[in-house]
Image (spheres, helix red, strand yellow):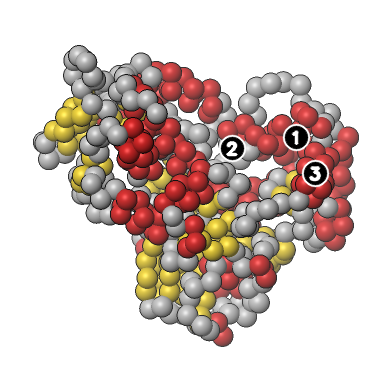
Amino acid sequence: MSAAYRLREISNETNTPIEITLIEGRSRLGGVIHTIKRDGFLIDSGPDNFVTIKPWAMALIRRLGIESELISTNEAHRSALVVRKGKLQPIPEGFLLMAPTKVMPVLASPIFSIPGKLRMGMEFFIPARTENGDESLASFVTRRFGREALDRVVQPLISGIYTARPERLSLRATMPRFLDLEQKHGSVIRGMRKEQKARKTKGSGARYGMFVTFRDGLHTLITALENRLSEADFRLNQRVVRVRKKEQNALPLWNVDLEDEGTIESNGVILTGPSKHAARLVTDLDPELAGGLSKVEYASSAVVHLAYERRQIGHPLDAFGCVVPTIENRHIIAASFSSVKYEGRAPRDAVLLRAFMGGALHPHMAAREDDELTRLAQTDVADLLNITGAPLFSLVSRWPDSMAQYDVGHLERIAALRAQAERHSAFALAGNGFEGVGIPDCVRAGEAAAESVARDLGISW
């Protein structure tokens, strides 16, 4: 939808008529973004927020004129918990994804052993890696901070974002900042402290926290895009089976074959679905490109939404949620306290929780029935949060093959795919299988694809 909207903007800016057809296999627009309202609860069944430090989503929102509908996280509980020996413990203040920036909170934390704390402190004295090649997240963290840091905090935090195996996850493709800190400062902790000091010196005019969402749920963005694209041809419940290139004369000409045996003729094509699906569509067009796309792996996940009365929960819920290390042998990989994190997610005296399951570390979970997923999620959440009684209701959202896995060497493989795709005029790829999995990354990818196709069609702005 961001690709379609960027095309509409280019059309308006250049006074060039562009007919847009958007083909969607589901019965609704928005992909994994979907907001549900039930019994006074507001449920985002896929992602429930996005980061503001990546500017592309915010820029789109401002152009759509819906910035006033954004809300920030609850200022009272901007922290997270981690499970340690079956109990919830606060992640030490200043522990930013992969590295501690404050000494005392780490020393006081029961999450780490004394040897583990000493090992993290040694990071100051460990020389920077001299090799320039890609490295896995597990390798980087254990090399700089030790195994405990990885197993007890970093792995669950990162898995909550990428649902990936840290031994395979490319650090350069996902968290390049930490590699850059090591190279520039010789120490990640030293580099992060210098950055924090510089930010405090300069001050910040940011209006929002790092995470934001819409007052009425993320589908606000989809609705705004749909309204602005009123002249586009939205074709829901239709699936593309093949993309073919016809002979090119003054402009490229493509055929897009549909499952119902219909065909759409177009001057340009943008594929925005999962890479493996895109691979099937271009097998006849470009076997080499299809082969590369099919190698981008995806993990499946499920979200179990649980609604409770507040009096049922013994835990103070003084955080936005918790992450669960694999070594804890739980069924869930994380839980979000949605109605604590953002206002308006539950009625007064009620609580909305989201339990995350599956991913690359628990692939078997995605195959389980809804009733079993709900039962397992309830068991874990009830034990961790001291919950009594059954939920008011539960809801399972499944996302099969939705989380792209950025294995080591991912950026090099994607660069080769991009080069291969560029051999085809007015053809572009976008989606979470390439340069980023978050909403801002996908907005950027869609807009870049739109601009690429427009340029190939001779439109300049």
Q: Which labelled disc corresponds to residue 373?
A: none
The answer to which image quadrant residue 384 occupies is bottom right
Q: CA distance from mark 3 to mark 1?
A: 14 Å
Counting from the top left corner in percent of width and height, residue 82 is at: 67, 60
Determine which residue is flagged by label 1. 181
Amino acid under label 3? Answer: Ala
The answer to which image quadrant residue 110 occupies is bottom right
Amino acid under label 1? Answer: Leu
Determine which residue is flagged by label 3. 198
Amino acid under label 2? Answer: Thr
Q: Which labelled disc corresponds to residue 174?
A: 2
Query: Which of the two labelled residues, at mark 2 and mark 3, occupies the earlier sequence position?
Result: 2
**In the rendered view, does 272 fall on the left or right side of 210?**
left
Evaluate whether residue 137 shows in this view. Answer: yes
Camera-side residue of 94 and 389: 94
Mark 1–mark 2 contact, CB under 8 Å? Answer: no
Q: Residues within 10 Å of mark 1 (few under 14, many from 20)?
A: some
Looking at the image, is 263 positioned above or below residue 67? Answer: above
Query: Which of the two labelled residues, at mark 3 and mark 1, occupies the earlier sequence position?
Result: 1
Q: Name the element at disc 3.
A: helix
